[in-house]
Image (spheres, grey):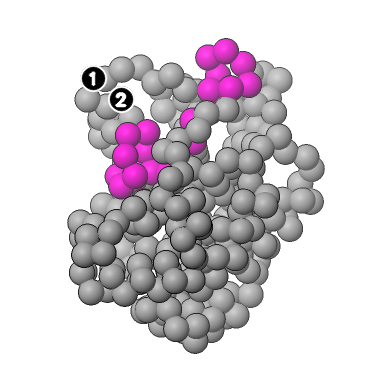
Amino acid sequence: MRIALLSDIHGNLVALDAVFDDLRQQGAVDQIIVAGDLVWSGPWPAHVVDRVREVATTVVQGNTDKFFRHRAGETPSGKDDDRFAAHLAWMTEHLGSERVDFLADLPFSCRVSPDPGADLLVVHANPFDLERPIPPHLAEEDLNELLLGEDSREPEWQALAFGHLHAPYVRRWQGRLLVDVASAGLPMDGDQRAAYAILTWDRRQRWQAEHRRVFYPVPVVAHEMRSCGMPRGKHFAERLVAANYGRPLQTLAMFSG
């Protein structure tokens, strides 16, 4: 079984199409799963939603997709009221009500079960919420607390795939596979290329992960961000070109576009 996973497209249609073009050259996959954050901070929100719905098998919700549940005057924690309201209004206008409802109603997670007891769990950030990231070098004690939850229950999955942090990595934890599939549309690991992953359930009955990076014309997207009328377009264009957070990944509390 082969599963293609991508996340954090952030309205970057050019990068998304480049990923899908590359994926078509990698041989057949059984499912294409998108792990959230489809449109926020990107210039082509409606086109991205439509393309994802045409191609993807399953889509789970990201923290910025959940923004579309907010009503006028409601601002997520950590966001500036005026900036959030302006961006939400622009996105809502360009998406239309049906796409807004689609994003607001996405499921929290999905499971792929190649064999009994071999589940792959796909979430946006972690198995319990949409906000707390799983940094690549998180201390084992903190990782245990994050992945076992308040009741320290043994996870019912053998592999966990997620995005949110926009930086690809693979890590083993308690005999399980952790895969940050990173960002298709807004990478933050110093590499401008779009990122996605292919997970394979192999003959030895274990999950294996391959990250892929895909070139696309970043300047074209940056220009569109600056010129399309999207609030703070210059800011998002600079972030796209820089391809980093400006601080070490292990210090990050969250990223929400």
Image position, residue 135 (x, y; %)? 35, 46
- Please report contact status of discs 2 and 1: CB closer than 8 Å, yes or no: yes
Q: Residues within 10 Å of mark 1 (few under 14, many from 20)?
A: few
Q: Residue at x 41, y 54 (%)?
A: 65
Q: Could you say where residue 15 lies in the image, as x and y percent from the top left?
A: 61, 65
Q: Which residue is mark 2?
A: 148
* Picture layout, residue 97 above or below residue 6: below
Name of the residue lying farthest toward the bottom: 227
- Magenta residues, as a range? 113-134
> For numbered disc 2, what is the local secondary structure?
helix
Q: Secondary structure at mark 1?
A: loop
The quarter of the picture where the C terminus appears is bottom left
Type of the residue with mark 2: Leu
Question: Quadrant of the image for the N terminus?
Answer: top right
Hey, what amino acid is under mark 1?
Asp
Residue 124 is inside the magenta segment: yes
Q: Which residue is identified by label 1?
A: 151
Q: Is residue 143 magenta?
A: no
Residue ID at (34%, 44%): 130
Image quadrant in which you'd find residue 174: top left
> Would residue 201 be seen by someone viewing this image from the given angle?
yes
